[in-house]
Image: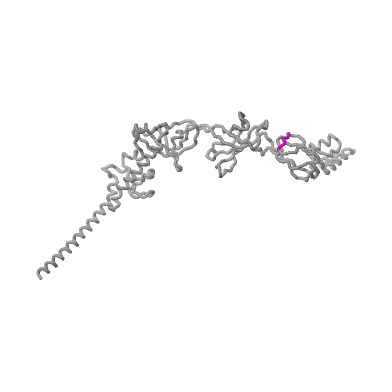
Amino acid sequence: MKNKNIVVVAAALAALLATSGYGLYRAGMQRGQKMAAALPAAASQTADGGRKVLYWHDPMVPDQKFDRPGKSPFMDMQLVPVYAGAAADEASVNISPRVQQNLGIRTAAVINGNLTSAVAAVGSVAYNERDAALVQARSNGFLERLYVRAPLDPVHKGQVLAEVYVPEWVAAQEEYLSVRHMQGNGMDSLLGAARQRMSLAGMSDAQIQLVETGGKVQGRLAILAPISGVVSDLAVREGMTLIAGAAMFKINGLDPIWLNADVPEGLAAQVRPGNAVEARTPALPGTVFKGKVAAILPDVDPATRTLKARIELANPSGRLAPGMFATVSFSSIVRKDILLVPSEAVIRTGTRSVVMIAQGDGKFAPAAVETGSESNGQTEIRSGLEEGQNVVVSGQFLIDSEASLSASETRIEGGASATPAGAAQ
């Protein structure tokens, strides 16, 4: 019985001690959590051996800075601190001179100079639609004789194209000649009215002049070419009946002639109306045709992403024919006092352009730049660099890869160091 009482007392003491110990453990845990929660704020300025933290960032997005630690809004990782004295070196990599020599790393200076933009394009010759004439039947009649019998026949201004017989014109001529032979007062007004009737019937001034000088009825009247060129459209045949308003001939001039050049959309800003142009065609080797840009057509080809530049070329001998292929060189445009780097120094990622800056002592750092025009191996830098800086022109892709690896290591180390703090919280 006595032993039984001793066992009960011992069990009660053990329960009491267990309860007290759990309470002390809970109090210690709560105190530890409060200290851990306050730790980032206290250590934010003196972390890592007492070094001052300037800011936190995501190594994959180094341009975005944060004033306190936490989880990156861009990646599934903790933000990494940047310490005083290391901010300038955070994105740089160190490469020994021996490794630089093995990689063949070359640098070039950022200069302030002139950029000459030479734009070249290809195109095809076409009719000058501003130098075209349409010949129509001005009255009902008959086409008695046709002198131009095939499309694309060359003609010159004033050449006879056809002879027509128009009954209405014959009647108007007879009336005019009858009034002309009459004598008496007031005949001038009647003669003027008869002449007006010939004009209203559709006779041209040249045809009326022929009747006046000849003094007799002209049964057949000639249709003359109004301009020189080629007959691009022939809509009549000999013996046809003509209807007033029907098209008979379309004549296109060949001097000047058009050249429609396909200018890439990215170079369209460098081509302006009035720019001088030189054109060459394989059909006429050694011959240079000079002209100027008449217009930039407001239409982009969705397949080739090009704009049409309409060019007027002098073609006095008519050797340029529609459909000929030609290469075009636009006049050079010189832009002065702009920052230039070798084009091979620019790394284009698709979303931005980057260059590797040589900082000296084997240090290299990437810099985002805004590029402009490019010509003759030189690229315009609108922002991101200063004159006198050195950029890498050979081996920059290897340096960029090294910088990416360094950023990955920093991210991994930052994530590893942040894990215990996250667990403590």
Which quadrant would residue 151 be assigned to in this image? top right
The residue most toward the bottom is 1
Front-most of 287 and 200?
A: 287
Q: What residue is shown at x 24% (from left), y 55% (from top)?
A: 31
Position above or below: 115 against 5 = above
User: x, y (%) of residue 165?
Assistant: 82, 41
- Relative placement, left or right, of 144 versus 351 is right
**What is the total number of numbered labels drawn onto the structure image?**
0
Q: Which residues are magenta?
A: 152-156
Q: What residue is shown at x 38% (from left), y 40% (from top)?
A: 401
Residue 256 belongs to the span the image colors magenta: no
The residue most toward the right is 183
Colour pattern of the rendering: one colour
Front-most of 327 and 357?
A: 327
Prevailing SS of the magenta stretch: loop
The residue most toward the left is 2
Task: Say which quadrant the N terminus sits in.
Answer: bottom left
The answer to whether one can see residue 294 in this image is no
Front-most of 175 and 21?
A: 21
Q: What residue is shown at x 37% (from left), y 43% (from top)?
A: 62
Which quadrant would residue 253 be assigned to in this image? top right
The answer to whether one can see residue 324 in this image is yes
Which quadrant would residue 193 be assigned to in this image? top right
User: x, y (%) of residue 74?
Assistant: 39, 48
- Relative placement, left or right, of 307 versus 195 is left
User: x, y (%) of residue 267?
Assistant: 53, 38
User: x, y (%) of residue 422?
Assistant: 30, 52
